[in-house]
Image (cartoon, helix red, strand yellow):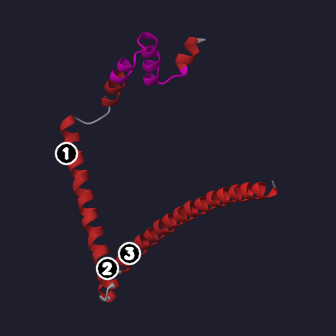
C-alpha cells in the first residue's frame, strides 16, 4: 500500500513524507522546509537587490499617487480641471469612491452602536417601569 502511495507522490512530497517519519520535531521540519525552498531560488545577492527594486517601484508609485491627489485637491479648491488628464481624473474618482465607502462604513458602525445603546437603555427603562408598576400594585 505504501509503495503505491509513494509512487503517486511528487519527489518533494516523498521527501516530506519520509522526513516526517524520521524526525517529527517542529524545528527539524522548519529547517528542512527552508533547505528545500531555497533550491529553486536565485542567489542571496540577487535576492537582496530585488527588495531594493520593489521599494523603488513602490516609492515611484506612491509619488505619482501623491501628485495626482494633490492635483485633485487643487481642483476641488478652485483649480483648473483642464490641466488634469482623463486618467488622473479617473484615479481621483476611485479614491473619492473609496473614501466615501470608508465614511459610510464608519457611519454605519456608529449608528449600529447607537442603536445598541438605545436598546440597552430601553431594556433598563422597561425593567425600571416594571419594578415601579409592581411597587404601585402592592
Mark 1 vs 2: CB contact within 8 A: no
Q: Secondary structure at mark 1?
A: helix
Cβ–Cβ under 8 Å for marks 3 and 2? no
Along the viewing direction, whichever of 5 and 99 lies nearer the viewer: 99
In this figure, which residue is indicated by the disc labeled 1? 49
Name the residue at 49% across, 68% down.
Answer: 101
Quick one: label 1, few (<14), some, or many (20+) residues within 10 Å? Answer: few
Q: What is the spatial separation of the Cα atoms under label 1 and label 2, in whole angstroms?
A: 36 Å
- Residue 65's image quarter? bottom left
Is 136 included in the stretch rendered in magenta? no
Dominant secondary-structure state across the stretch colored magenta? helix
Say whether disc 3 or disc 2 marks the residue closer to the N-terminus.
2
When asked about the image quadrant of residue 38, the answer is top left
Locate residue 61, reporting x and y percent. 28, 63
Q: Which residues are magenta?
A: 8-31
Using a 10 Å C-alpha cutoff, classify the residue at mark 3 as few (fewer than 14 neighbours), some (14 to 19) or many (20 or more): some
**What is the CA distance from the residue labelled 3 to the residue labelled 1?**
33 Å
Q: Quadrant of residue 48?
A: top left
Rendered location of residue 106, percent (x, y) = 49, 64
Element carrying mark 3: helix
Choose the circle earlier in sequence order: 1 or 2: 1
Which comes sooner in the sequence, label 3 or label 1?
1
> At 81% from the left edge and 53% from the top edge, which residue is drawn?
138
Q: Position of residue 52 (x, y in %)?
A: 20, 49
Residue marked by disc 2: 73
Give whichever of 63, 136 is nearer the camera: 136
Left/right placement of residue 93 relative to residue 119 reads left
Residue denoted by label 3 = 92
Query: Residue 116 or 129: which is nearer the viewer?
Result: 129
Tally of numbered discs: 3
Location of residue 39 with respect to 67 vertically, above or below = above
Amino acid at each position: 500500500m505504501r509503495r503505491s502511495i509513494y509512487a503517486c507522490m511528487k519527489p518533494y512530497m516523498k521527501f516530506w513524507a519520509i522526513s516526517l517519519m524520521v524526525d517529527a520535531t517542529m524545528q527539524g521540519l522548519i529547517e528542512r522546509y527552508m533547505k528545500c525552498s531555497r533550491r529553486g531560488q536565485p542567489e542571496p545577492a540577487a535576492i537582496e537587490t530585488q527588495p531594493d527594486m520593489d521599494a523603488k517601484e513602490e516609492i515611484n508609485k506612491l509619488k505619482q499617487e501623491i501628485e495626482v491627489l494633490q492635483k485633485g485637491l487643487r481642483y476641488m479648491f478652485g483649480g483648473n480641471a483642464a490641466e488634469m488628464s482623463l486618467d488622473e481624473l479617473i484615479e481621483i474618482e476611485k479614491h473619492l469612491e473609496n473614501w466615501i465607502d470608508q465614511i459610510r462604513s464608519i457611519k454605519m458602525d456608529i449608528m449600529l452602536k447607537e442603536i445598541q445603546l438605545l436598546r440597552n437603555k430601553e431594556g433598563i427603562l422597561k425593567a425600571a417601569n416594571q419594578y415601579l408598576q409592581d411597587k404601585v400594585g402592592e
